[in-house]
Amino acid sequence: MSNSRLNASAKNQGRVFTIPGQVVSLVVLVTPLLVALYMSFTDWSPTRSSLSGASFLGLENYQELLIYDNRFLQAVGRTALLAVICLSLEFVFGLALATLFLRTFRGQRFLFSAFLSPMMVLPVVVGYTFWMLFQSNGPVNQVLALIGVTSVEWFRDSSLAFLAVVVTEVWHWTPLFFLILLSGLNAVPENPIRAAVILGASPRQVFWKVVFPALRPVIIVAFVIRAMEVIKIFDEVFLLTRGGPGSATETISLYIYKLAFNDFQLAYGAAAAFLVLAGSLLMVHLLMIPVRDQLLDNRG
Amino acid sequence: MIELIDLTKEYPGSSQVAVDKLNLTIEKGETIALLGPSGCGKTSTLNMIVGLEKPSRGDILVNGQSIVAIPAEKRGIGLVFQDYAVFTSMTVAGNLAFGLVIKKTPKKEIQAVVNETAEFLGLTAKLNVKARYLSGSELQRVAIGRTLATKPSILLLDEPLSNLEPEARLAMRQELRRLRQELGLTIVYVTHDQVEALSLADRLAIMSYGRLIQVEKTAVMLEKPQKIQVAQFLGDPPMNVFSGFFHLEGGPAFRVGAVDFRLPLASAPAGVKVGSANYYYLGVRPEDLSFTTQDKALFTGQVTGLESRGYDCVVNLSQKDLEIKALAIDPIPDWDETAYLSAPKDKFFVFDGSGELLTMGL
């Protein structure tokens, strides 16, 4: 048998082995997705009829969401705002920490593990813990009382509740930025930095002109990963504020959850979910454009 | 003019001295190659001259003034890295302009210098190309151009050609020669490749284990290596060297220890001490050895290695522990065949026990 034929048959064999995985993903992933997509074009609610008995509405649900449903649009805007604020803070803190860890110092190993640990805590636990911390007679307020700030009602004021969510989220996920940026910084080749120094660049110029461009793909990947997570944020907000007060901290996931499980508007919720999916796909795609070539460029 | 005075570099935690009391004067407009095996302290020396590393001891003078306390960017010395270290996220123009932008040079002037440099190095067509899409030799030219744009008085090159393919290497060598002629720069460059060093440098400075072994005009260095380390480093393959002693029993001769190798001489060379207590090194270049018949042989051995290089063949001859390399074109001896070698007596080098050249020719 010639080498190429051997390769071809090996390739076919490889494909055969992927069949079980493909079948599983078809059953558990593709099918429900298609059902949900169909559902989003109907007025189905489990309390009224079966899915097959529901009437087909076409794009009505989508129209409603995009044009008339202010609560949905606000949730989208709020989630975007949350993403921008959290990601900016996480990036700044993560980068500062990563830069700090580029030098060796005493206790570095211990602190490294310590700084990474928040990321490993379950979101539910984080939400619950911060809910306790932010109680009106909780530790945060006790500390604030020491500097003369008293009776801060974290969950009764819209802005404060939002701030509490931001603090929780930033605490929880800065380690991810720290980890990704640290590995990115370590991979930046040394000689271009030295070359820039010889040519007279200040440390700031070295960072912005040499290190940052080399780090850009890593930064964008970190942002994409985190942005997708923030869009999906649920546990922490649910445990901290349940979206309140009013709908001041209601994120997209929380709103869709309420649509589906409080109001049993499953079809409408599905449409909202598909809009979010389309939106995040578009966002990821747009974010990746400037660095796609750099990431896919395999030349050593 | 650069003067290195007792330049020493020790790295903490390393028992070996990276650069050991280096003394070297490099004239203005001269091209000098620091040549030596990997880890001999060449790159550390460059880094100290450019200011990336501080010497542990010693001084570096440029035109009579110490530059050790001056930061790298103010020394007016350019360094081109072995891996080019080009800013890959920038265009070629961005790279060439980098040093000038940092120095806040007026835009018009930057533009002029960038164009001039690009033209000089044949990069004009690539000015707007992102550096990451360039080939090795283009990257190399960008790296050189980026340094030249800042108009350094001294250019340091760290293994400038070692990452290039043979063809590009040849072209780059010509480029560097042109650079030197047209710009009159003082160039110090580091290499472990002697062909590179021989083809470019006015003088060679050979280093070994952090020490400077010999500094000499390139042609003289080849002709007359003053130290045995130089003889054993230069040449491809380098000089054959055997240790042995001169004796007079049965006529003057040089004898290599336990091996049956005896080189009859008209007389012992002037200044050598005769007798087995005084060791000397005898050297002969592979290209000076020729295959001959048994009766004319100075050395007899078995062929234990053949390395064809296309145009010739390096033949390894062994006799007990003694090995000697010779070049054969045609005929090429067979493996295990007994072969006989001879060389004109004036092609032999004699080094004393400490490795200093005593005399050429026997």
Image (spheres, coloured by chain):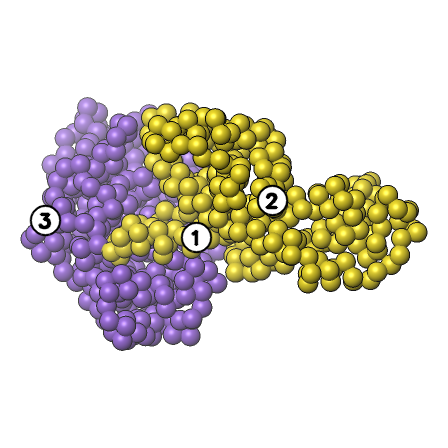
Residues tagged 3 and 2 counted as in contact (Cβ below 8 A):
no
Colour of chain B in the image:
purple
The part of the image, by quadrant, that contains residue B9 is top left
Residue type, mark 3 in image: Ser
Q: Which mark sits nearer the N-terminus, 1 or 2?
A: 1
Q: Badge 2: how crowded within 10 Å, few (<14), some, or many (20+)?
A: few
Between the C-alphas of marks 3 and 1, the distance is 36 Å
| Residue furthest to the right | A53
- In the rendered structure, find residue B66 and report the number of the disc placed on it: 3
Name the residue that disc number 2 marks: A246
Residue A253 in sight: yes
Colour of chain A in the image:
yellow
Please, is residue B180 above or below residue B6 in the view? below
Please, is residue A48 above or below residue B14 in the view? below
Q: Name the front one of labels 3 and 2.
A: 2
Give me the chain letter of mark 2: A
Quarter of the image for the N terminus of chain B: give it.
bottom left
Residue type, mark 2 in image: Gly
x 84%, y 55%: residue: A42
